[in-house]
Amino acid sequence: MNRSVHPAGVAAGCQFASDNTAGSCPEAWDAMARANEGCVPSYGDDPWTGRACDAIRRVFECDADVFFVFNGTAANSLALAAACQSYHAVVCHELAHVETDECGAPEFFSNGTKVLTAPGEHAKLTPAAVAHVVERRRDIHYPKPRVLSITQATELSTVYTPAEVVGLAEVCRAHGLVLHMDGARFANAVAALDVPPRAITWEAGVDVLCLGGTKNGAGVGEAVVFFRRALAHEFAWRCKQAGQLASKMRFLTAPWVGLLDGDAWLRHARHANAAAARLEEGLAGVAGVEILGRRQANAVFARLSPGLAAGLRARGWRFYDFIGAGGCRFMCSWATTDADIDALLGDAAAVAADV
Ligand SMILES: *Cc1c(COP(=O)(O)O)cnc(C)c1O
């Protein structure tokens, strides 16, 4: 195992593998503990769920319809299904989580809607790329594009600026597409851009956002936020049928109160982004490392010499070879400490000196 040790004495080798290796942040955990007191109505008719909805509306400065589900795959696929008929298509980037990491759930929950992918640098779509996919076929024999899905922050840790979201929304309006945002790391995007959340969502033309809680610091739970409220028609039934209606809903919603009241969500996201910046700077100085991409959020992508990657893994470090970048991905979270980063960098330097 590597030499770095967490305060609890747990080896930290897996932690850069994903932001999901982190536990629940103290604010979410504390809210869970407070929500555990007494009896409250079930299935969402409880005060915690009301407070969580209000907190999300406050953060977005608008009167959205809000639903809570267990994970991001459910949030994305149910939101997409709500916008699509079975003969429709969802346009997304070829690296999009909805295409590569959801086991066909978007197609499954929409009863056959096809996912159509487009390429784009740094995991970002351009208006021209979207227009190309939509315009190349318009005949009755091809599924009809109905949704554009973009990821914010992207799978390669880049972000769309407000102007870029507006540009994509204009293509959507021109072609009658709904604009869906996969915001599993939405907090990291807000932190990176330093803009109000509304500036990259409804104000820019986003119709529905899947807002990530888990990677941000909750133990479990994502929110589906409908800015175009007509899309939320009968969504509660869709969630229930998909097994996504929590009976003790307060445990899914209290963490949101903990995250959002007092702005822990943004503090944690800024921390994760800063940790990635620190790690990136350190890795850039290690022999055998080439930093890849244009990191703006909380993941570092780097090409490691084979000996270095193997040596780090032999010391217990876990990280993914990432499909998109042809390199390794190191993910930071709210829980990443300077000591964790220094331990990884120390091992990298030691292995690099040996190979
Ligand atoms: C993690 C992630 C999700 C959600 O994944 P689940 O494992 O289903 O919670 C969705 N989109 C992106 C881009 C992600 O990174």
Image: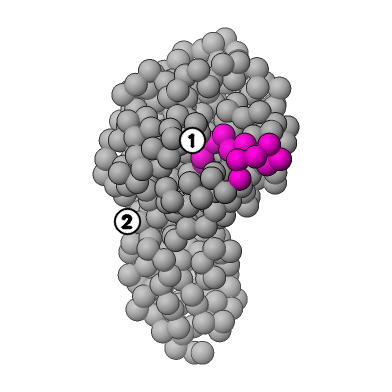
Using a 10 Å C-alpha cutoff, classify the residue at mark 2 as few (fewer than 14 neighbours), some (14 to 19) or many (20 or more). many
Residue 187 is situated, as x and y percent measured from the top left of the image, at 39, 41
The picture quadrant where one finds residue 174 is: top left
Secondary element at image label 2:
helix
Position of residue 38 in the picture relative to residue 238 (left or right):
left
Q: Residue at x 68, y 36 (%)?
A: 140
> Pointer 1: what residue?
175
Tell which circle, 2 or 1, labels the residue nearer the N-terminal end.
1
The one of 349 and 188 positioned closer to us in this rendering: 188
Using a 10 Å C-alpha cutoff, classify the residue at mark 1 as few (fewer than 14 neighbours), some (14 to 19) or many (20 or more). some
> Pointer 2: what residue?
274
Position of residue 297 in the picture relative to residue 229 (left or right):
left
What range is drawn magenta here?
A: 137-149
Q: Residue at x 70, y 46 (%)?
A: 103
Secondary element at image label 1:
helix
Marks 2 and 1, how far apart in space? Answer: 38 Å
Q: Is residue 32 visible?
A: no
Residue 353 in the image: above or below residue 336: below
In the rendered structure, which amino acid carries the disc numbered 1?
A: His
In the rendered structure, which amino acid carries the disc numbered 2?
A: Ala
Q: Quadrant of the N terminus?
A: bottom right
Residue 310 is situated, as x and y percent measured from the top left of the image, at 59, 78
Q: Residue at x 43, y 33 (%)?
A: 173
